[in-house]
Image: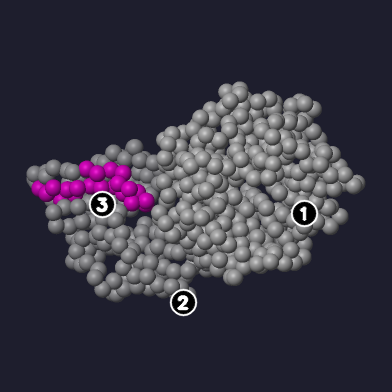
Amino acid sequence: MKTTLLIVFLFAFIKVYAQPGTLDKSFGDTGVALNKTLEGIANVIGLQSDGKIIAAGGGTVNGSGIFLLVRYNTDGSIDSSFGNDGVTGTTELSEVFGMTVQKDDAIIALGHTSKDIKLAKYKKDGGLDETFGANGTVITDVEDNDVPVEVLIQPDGKILVGGYSINNSNEPRDGFLIRYMPDGSLDKNFGDKGIKILDSISSPMGMVSLNSIALQNDEKIVVATNNFKPYVYRFNSDGSIDRGFGNKGEAYFQGRFVANSIALQTDGKIVGGGYAGSNMGAACLNADGKIDSSFGNNGIVQVLFGKDYSEATKLLVQSDNKIILSGFVHDEFFSYARFALTRLKNDGSNDSTFAENGQTETNINGFATAHDANLQKDGKIILVGDDVSNIVLARYNNDFNKKQILITKIKKWIQHHNGIEWDNTPGTQSYAVQRSIDGQHWTTVYHSQVTAYSAHYSDPTHSSTGTTYYRLQTTGTSNAVATSNVIAISNNELNVSLSPNPAKNTLSIAGLAINEKIKITVVDFSGNTAISQQLSPVPPNAGADSQLYNLDVSSLHAGNYVLKVETGTNSVAKQFVKE
């Protein structure tokens, strides 16, 4: 009996990260940017294409209240080239509650006058864009007392605004959506001449505050409100209610949860960040509006920061669907408050690789609350808030967009022990040895935490016939999972050879048995079958004890493949390269 070894050189790459969730000490003063000469509060944050940071809210300049925007350089210093020494705004007693940055780096800021919604558009350098509305601003009267909440830019350049009105007792009454054309005029094709009032869709009826909006790829609009229950609605792009969502257009998050912020995962699921009782929380709905029972505890998660009270003011979804919750923690009497940040896996479970066991707090002058957050292109997390009198920014390291990689692979097959040996790779948490009889379906036969500089596994159930495949599944310290190269151990008498190798259009297979049924399978390194053919028995020719078969591989993509030859009694696996 002859044993042959085929090593398939497919390398798995595992990302290695600086500790995510820790303060980025290259930003501001060891991670925090606080300019005490600039009095004000910040509610929202935005990023321009060059990485510069816009913080917006309200403040006082030369004794006058101002609709305030401040631009920071990427290192946390104020950018004096923006506006007037880094600051711009309008001299009305107002406040920015929402903001979005357009593709051309122009800025749309959402606020209000005494009772009405106000939009202002600023050029990249901070000057008002006088082509927008009336000399750069638009004022919209929805009902008697209007409260702005959020503004988004649609892919077609239209501007979507969400908010709610209040009555004379400052209680929420009606949520609303407004859509503007790119020039600031109302979009007459949306709702009722540009405005959609949410006063007739809720059951049971009641006072409605609109908390957050999100835009799907198909331009449908998802809205989170608070009305007896944490209702979520979905609207078609024209403002009509989408009756195919939830219960005739209406859904709700689980339990007592209130969503301050919502976002969409790549599979269309709707996640909300806010609070449940006295704790920061998150909740999830499936794309159809039904509660996602696989998320956390039947659709809801509470995040405990010791015995402190906590609340999420912003939820971000990473490209890997992990969930970032930012906000603040405080004691019962609000005698102190700190920035708070945590990360969850996409199923709502705690991501212990982030910060210290999944969460971090930042103490800034004893009392600071974070109101908004954003993700930079490099994955770092920016939080903005205030310490009551001054704008505060903090930046944290993150890991999902890092490019540093390491290679992990099976080192060799241990012939006399029927096992594999590998070298441990820095940044690795654990290994799992996986076995397969077909190169496609894998079973874990051994699992080990990293304990030494090299490791091995001997398989007591290794088959002495046929072909057995092995690979290493590696889990990094960040919980990233990857697989190593594949090795195929063949115990058979088949003497098959391949040529040419690499092959361009045709792969010649020599040494095939005669007078037997033969199955030929080509498998790529993802375990997918690329070619599968059954050859009919060939009668023996005079003087020949094997046959040659030419396999058409012209349809394959360039790369590495494994060819398996199976007869009734034996099998063999060979690697080849498609040019």
Mark 2 or 3: in front is 2
Tag 2–tag 1 contact (CB < 8 Å): no
Q: Secondary structure at mark 3?
A: strand
Q: Residue 422, relative to residue 173: is it above or below? A: below
Residue 449's tag is none
Q: CA distance from mark 2 to mark 3?
A: 35 Å
Mark 2 or 1: the one toward you: 1
Query: In the image, residue 268 lies at what x, y percent?
Result: 46, 43
Q: Foreground mark, 3 or 1? A: 1
User: According to the image, label 2 marks what residue?
Assistant: 452
Whole-percent x and y of residue 576?
34, 50
- Which image quadrant: the C terminus? top left
Give the amino acid type for the residue marked by disc 1 in the picture: Ile
Secondary structure of residue under mark 2: loop
Q: Which mark is residue 391?
A: 1
Left or right of residue 352, residue 571 in this image? left
**Where residue 555 sits: x, y (%)?**
34, 37
Disc 3: which residue: 564
